[in-house]
């Protein structure tokens, strides 16, 4: 009779191997009521059915943790994309070739976005997007927004590019070069005033 009972039971060490855990973890499972023990001749055994149920729960928890990480990653991506869409719509609504003139509402939105960059963190994607948008702004739009504000902002973006240079050298350098090229659109007197 004992042989029949033992055929369906496995030892603690075998159960630990099957569950990829140690003996103490098996004890914790027992204390929490997840796993039931059976004593035969003063030795602790577990049924294969109980072990397979615990294995299913453990696998499900692992999958849940992976899904939670993936969901968090995707939520961060959505936030980043929403930020990009807001910047694009603030600059021109939808991408057009060149921005020559802006409405008062657009000017205020752009100024607000620039001010927000002083409190928000800027990623390499944000830098690229700002470089794209700034490269399309014509001299009339520059004057509407405010030459001094834009010039200072471009200088700040260039210094941020220098920080990213060590991590993402090629991309940061391309963005930096485009921002430097945009600085040529400003009045020479303004550029000299900022260099002093």
Image (cartoon, grey):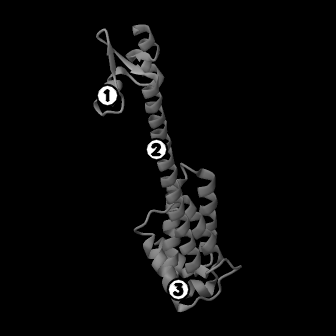
x and y percentages locating residue 95 in the rendered image: 67, 77
Disc 2 element? helix
Is the C-beta separation of discs 3 and 1 under 8 Å? no
**Label 3: few (<14), some or many (≥20) within 10 Å?**
many
In the depicted view, which residue is nearer to us: 111 or 55?
55
Of 64 and 196, the residue lying toward us = 64
* Label 2 environment density (alpha carbons within 10 Å; few <14, some 14–19, many ≥20): few
Q: Earlier in the sequence, mark 2 or mark 1?
A: 1
Residue found 53% across the figure and 71% down from its top: 154
Q: What residue is disc 1 on?
A: 30
Q: Position of residue 83 (x, y in %)?
A: 52, 69
Residue plotted at (51% across, 84% down): 146
Residue shown at 44%/26% (left/top)? 51
Disc with the residue nearer the chain's start (2 vs 3): 2
Between 141 and 38, the residue placed more toward the observer is 38
The image shows residue 90, relative to residue 1, as above or below, that is: below
Which dot, 2 or 1, sits closer to the camera? 1
Name the residue tied to disc 3. Answer: 107
In this figure, which residue is indicated by the disc labeled 2? 65
Disc 2 and disc 3 in contact, CB within 8 angstroms: no
Choose mark 3 or mark 1, whichever is in front: 1
Q: Disc 2 versus disc 1: distance between alpha carbons?
A: 23 Å
Q: CA distance from mark 2 to mark 3?
A: 45 Å
Q: Residue furthest bottom?
A: 104
């Amino acid at each position: 009779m004992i042989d029949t009972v033992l055929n369906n039971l496995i030892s603690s060490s075998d159960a630990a191997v099957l569950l990829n855990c140690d003996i103490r973890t098996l004890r914790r499972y027992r204390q929490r009521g997840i796993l039931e023990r059976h004593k035969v001749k003063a030795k602790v055994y577990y049924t294969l059915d109980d072990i397979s149920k615990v294995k299913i729960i453990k696998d499900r928890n692992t999958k849940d943790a992976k899904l939670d990480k993936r969901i968090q990653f995707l939520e961060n991506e959505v936030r980043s994309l929403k930020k990009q869409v807001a910047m694009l719509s603030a600059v021109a609504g939808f991408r057009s070739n060149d921005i020559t003139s802006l409405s008062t509402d657009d000017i205020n939105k752009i100024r607000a976005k620039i001010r927000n960059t002083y409190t928000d963190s800027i990623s390499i994607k944000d830098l690229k997007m700002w470089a794209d948008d700034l490269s399309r702004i014509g001299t009339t739009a520059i004057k509407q927004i405010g030459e001094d504000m834009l010039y200072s902002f471009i200088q700040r973006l260039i210094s941020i590019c220098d920080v990213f240079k060590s991590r993402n050298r090629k991309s940061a350098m391309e963005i930096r070069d485009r921002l430097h090229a945009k600085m040529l659109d400003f009045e020479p007197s303004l550029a000299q005033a900022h260099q002093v």
